[in-house]
Image: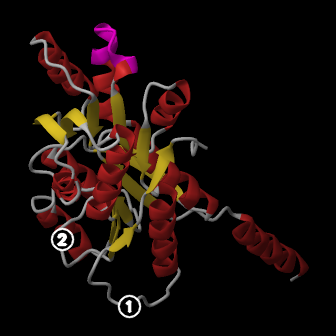
Amino acid sequence: MRQFFFASVLACAAVFAAPVRAVEISIIVNEPSNEFWFEEGELAKRYARKLGYDVRVFAHSGDLTTETALLQRAVESGSAAILLDPAHLENSARAVDEVVARGVPVFVLNAKLNSASVTAQFLSDNEACGRLAAQQFVTEMQGAGTFVQLDGPDSDLNSQLRRQGFESVLPEYPKLQRLKAMSAGWDRQTAFRKVSALLETGAHFDGVLSANDTMALGAIDALANYDRAQFVIIGGFDGTFEAQERITRGDMSYTIAQPLEQITQNAVDMMDRLLKGEELPKVEAPFLFPCHVIGGGTTG
């Protein structure tokens, strides 16, 4: 009897001493070679790990087939929830709806998704942020001069909203003339090639209004090859670390910082509440967060 008692105690102790496996979640971002998307994944991962989650981070690089495969992989690996920066406003919805139907909640970051099945969406207010960018650009240009506008992909909702923000401000300044507006797909090398091609024609311009920092950096690279960088006002958008360094060095005038820490922290907080059993109210509209200007002495 005594031996049985001690054996039972030891067995119970072993059970209670066994490590509890952390709950797994998956974070799926767009293209990690872009500093903004890389930092988005890192911030969400860091905060979720502080809350005790086992975190896996993946990237779909804007490819719908890859995104679908990663969503399925997250479900099959046992992820309790998914944080997703979707590849497409409409075309990502079907794969997300299937995941939610299998019992895994999805929280959307950064780019809107037209799906009623997601738990919540956390986004920058891109149109308002676009207006802020245009107003800052007007200030830097002193309301006059010629400029080039670099937009994101035409099919991208964030690009469309930022452009709408630009257009709500710029027509009020007739002395500010747009030489050319062109899409560079959020990509540094594409922006470099397109601005270089423009410079090769002998075009002269006083400013570059860019819808993200990565394209702004490509424009700086192109202008530097023509010894023009120091004479052109460059405005970015995202608030990346490299953009802030370039502002400090005098290569870039300003950037519009998206509140990435707020976006990721709010998303992870809501996910944590749901996974801990809290009943959340149905959220119809995305949570929208304001941007702020970095530049003109505000860096850091």
Residue 150 picture quarter: top left
| Quarter of the image that includes the N terminus | bottom right
Is residue 63 located in the magenta-colored stretch of the structure?
Answer: no
Q: Do we see residue 239 in this rendering?
A: yes
User: Which residue position holds label 1?
Assistant: 281
Of labels 1 and 2, the one closer to you: 1
Q: CA distance from mark 1 to mark 2?
A: 19 Å
Helix, strand or loop under label 1: loop
User: What span is colored magenta in the figure?
Assistant: 222-230
Helix, strand or loop under label 2: helix
Most frequent secondary structure within the magenta stretch: helix
Is residue 55 left or right of 99 when viewed as pictured? right
Estimate the x, y position of residue 268 in percent, counting from the top left.
48, 67
Estimate the x, y position of residue 23 in percent, counting from the top left.
51, 65
| Quarter of the image that includes the C terminus | top right
Sequence order check, earlier mark of 1 and 2? 2
Q: Do we see residue 33 in this rendering?
A: no
Residue 97, numbered label? 2
Estimate the x, y position of residue 270 in percent, counting from the top left.
47, 75
Please tell me which residue is depicted at 20% across the width and 65% down the height of the picture: 113
Q: Nearer the viewer, residue 136 or 194?
A: 136
Say which amino acid is labelled 2. Answer: Asp
Is residue 286 left or right of 195 when viewed as pictured? right
From the viewer's perspective, is residue 212 above or below residue 12? above
Is residue 107 left or right of 49 when viewed as pictured? left
